Amino acid sequence: MPDNQENNDISEMQVDLSNCDREPIHILGRVQSFGALLSVSTDWIVNHASENIDEFIGAKVQDLIGRPLVQCLSEAAIHTIRGRLQMLSTADSVERVFGVKLHDDISLFDLAIHYSGRSIIIEIEHHGVRDKTDYASYVRALIDRIGRVDSVSRVCELGARQMRMLVGFDRAMVYKFDTDGTGIVIAESASLDLESYLGLRYPASDIPRQARDLYKRNLLRIISDVNDNGHPVVPTRNPQGEPLDLSLSVTRAVSPIHLEYLRNMGVEASMSVSIIRRGELWGLFACHNYTPRVLPYETRTAAELFGQLFSFVLDQKDSDMVRAEEAKAQQLHDQLLAQLAEGSSVAESFEAIIAAIDTLVPYDGVVGWMDGEFVSRGYTPTQAEFIELARFLNTTTASTIYHTESIPDVYQKGADFSDRSVGMLVLPVSRTPRDYIVLFRREILRTVNWAGNPEKPVELGPNGVRLTPRKSFEAWQETVRNHSSPWTRTELKLAESLRMTLLEVVLRMTDTVNKERARAQESQEFLIAELNHRVRNILNLIRSLITQSHVEGQSVADFTKVIGGRIEALARAHDQITEENWSPSSLREMIKTEGEGYLGNVPDRIEIKGDDVLLHPRAFTTVALVIHELMTNSAKYGALSKSGGSITICLDTKKHEVLGISWEEKGGPEITEPPKRRGFGTTVIERSIPYDLEGTVDLHFAPSGVSVRFEIPMTFVVEGNADIKGLSNKKIAPQSAGTLSGDVLVVEDNMIIALDAEDCLMQLGASKVHLSASVSKALNLIEKVAITFALLDMNLGEQTSEPVAEALREQGIPFVFATGYGDTSHLSGAFENVKTLKKPYSKEDIAAVLP
């Protein structure tokens, strides 16, 4: 397959190849005969390739070592080399120069220059006859064509075809590495008479890790003739005793084991170009030729440039796919957040969650495991089997998804339910206790096409422990069992997004619960303080009433009558605060009632201006509490504490945006300065309306008396005729509730539709609506609850609601069907006369089919 290159560090490779039948030093030192290698230090030659160096620099091998470089190369050539050395920016940089004269003759050479430790490696090749091809423009045109396709697979197909056109090899392939080190041919362009390698997988041992690491440093490797004997490098170490590292050398020959590997494939020349994606080896362009082929340096440079630009385009297309996946994930996130009710738990929203991912991630079964509750759909382990599996899942990381194509490979007991589920995608939705939503997939028998038997990548050779490359590369099929279809990157991306969404729902639910708990605690403390305050005020008020109501010479009967009337008026005011009255009520009447508790039958000291309004119950009780507190304070300290004092209350609306209530006292004790101590009553006045109704309060202590301005949102005011003066706690008649009553049953497996049906039925007069997503739960409800009417979804996943309909009919309970299908042909004839609602339906549609 691809050029299986080895690290050329001599000290390391001597260990690997010490049992070879040739001296490792000579194997490592071979240089392909189409080029020569020269190693220099400063201006002195310290290493060189023997024999074939003569024709390049015109000197004998034995005469080169130790001679100054200026005696071997022309001054112009040395000047060019020095200039290119200045351009080497990293340890793995290689500079190339084309058409250089090494001597004064007319011969031209191509040079490649790089550092190797303390040495400078100069590789020399004959320049040959220039074909005058503008490779830069050529490569740019090829990349432009690739950039116009819209998928990674098409990029690779076109890349393989264009690489073959560029270099002229018999076969060009795009070879992609998997995470396990195996590789697969994902694109191919080959001569018509060649057997296709497309889709074949190669074991990781064909290109070991050491070779893959080297591919990241040396982007192009070429073997022009697998039968070339090459030439040894002499000497093999520099004056400091360090081995000569030829990792970046193109003319360096490769291991005879790899040459034998290529001969066994029938390949006589090969070239590989690395595909690097974000610093990692993604794959290779692997090119094969079935006769020796020497590529000019310019062509090889163009191929390397093409590989680098191809890597950028590949990364761009892959990034486009990632962005598309992120858009799907965001769509899933938004869809779920829109569907899940505020404060609802994951368990309560299970059906909505499954409905959201149903069309995005294929699966055969799903399990919800939340708060110890087991819910399943489709092909899954049983509850007992899943409880055991959950113990295993608890050992995995809670902060990310977990997936496998083969449960038995990672969890031995998974073999017990492999007939139902072998692959799983696990979404942890909490940390403690561990809750999960798990998608399961059934077994799919897969056939993997290997390039030869992967269990025998090498064989023992005739010379003891020396390794011999395998000789068979015929397609070898392996049937894989106990595996599901793999979870794709897109599916895993969506699953991770879903996990984050569910965590957001859990956190939101927890936050809502905490806020409600804090609010309940605050309300409880508020009510306790209010109760204590009210009791003390009532006792003080009764004492004041007794004292102030006594008139000299008044009879006991008259005194009792006066006191009784005032206490009764006070009781009526408190009834308005505490009574559970859920009908809109008159604000004017509430103020009047509060005033009568303090002023008896002389309410003329309280003037109410403006049109009356009806307040919703929530606003009514809050405003009544505030008005009562103002009345109490005024009777104790303000205008009502003196006989000449008065209160003016103005009611107004500002273009129907807010309800304004102005309170102004006059004729009471002069206020020299605001009270330093803010009691509970003042707190009620200042905070109740902003806290409960999101309104505003503006409180002032003027010398003439207290003035307050309240503004309440119009959402708490009943719309309609604004001039309703004279109403005395008049109630607005509720909307007709239809003919329903009592307990109603809804059988519907979609939570959102069930909630809509519940709202409609409650508006039509039902006292309570029971929701069920399954036949078994519905039948249980019918036994325990006196149902008066039922709305049944015809299809409940793999079931119909016919068993529920039969039970209702036996008990004489009326019911109707609901369906998303156009007819009821899939139901038995026993129910052909039952009324049917077609989805989507409204409250009016339900009312039309009520008995």
Image: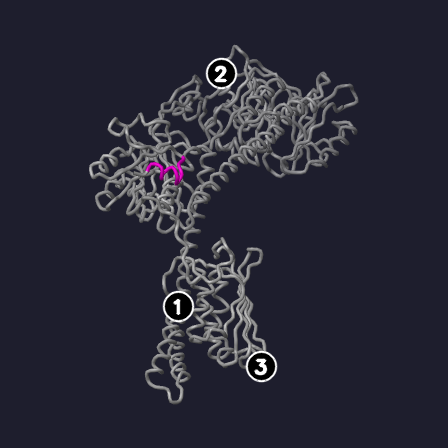
Residue 842 falls inside the magenta stretch? yes
Residue 645 in the image: above or below residue 440:
below
At a point 34% along the width and 86% down the height, the residue shown is: 555
Q: Is residue 514 visible?
A: no
Q: Calculate the distance from the C-alpha at mark 1 to the C-alpha at mark 3.
A: 32 Å
Residue 459 in the image: above or below residue 327:
above
Query: Looking at the image, which is closer to me, 117 or 419?
Result: 419
Label drawn at residue 527 = 1
Q: Is residue 14 visible?
A: yes
Q: Percent x, y for residue 794?
A: 31, 33
Q: Mark 3, residues whose alpha carbon is within 10 Å: few (<14), some, or many (≥20)?
A: few
Q: Nearer the viewer, mark 1 or mark 3?
A: 3
> Which residue position is annotated with label 2?
196
Q: Secondary structure at mark 3?
A: loop
Query: Looking at the image, which is closer to me, 245 or 154?
Result: 154
Residue 558 in the image: above or below residue 373:
below
Q: Earlier in the sequence, mark 3 or mark 2?
A: 2
Give the amino acid at mark 3.
Thr
Q: Earlier in the sequence, mark 2 or mark 1?
A: 2
Q: Earlier in the sequence, mark 1 or mark 3?
A: 1
Q: Secondary structure at mark 2?
A: loop
Query: Looking at the image, which is closer to me, 237 or 818?
Result: 818
Q: Which residues are magenta?
A: 840-849
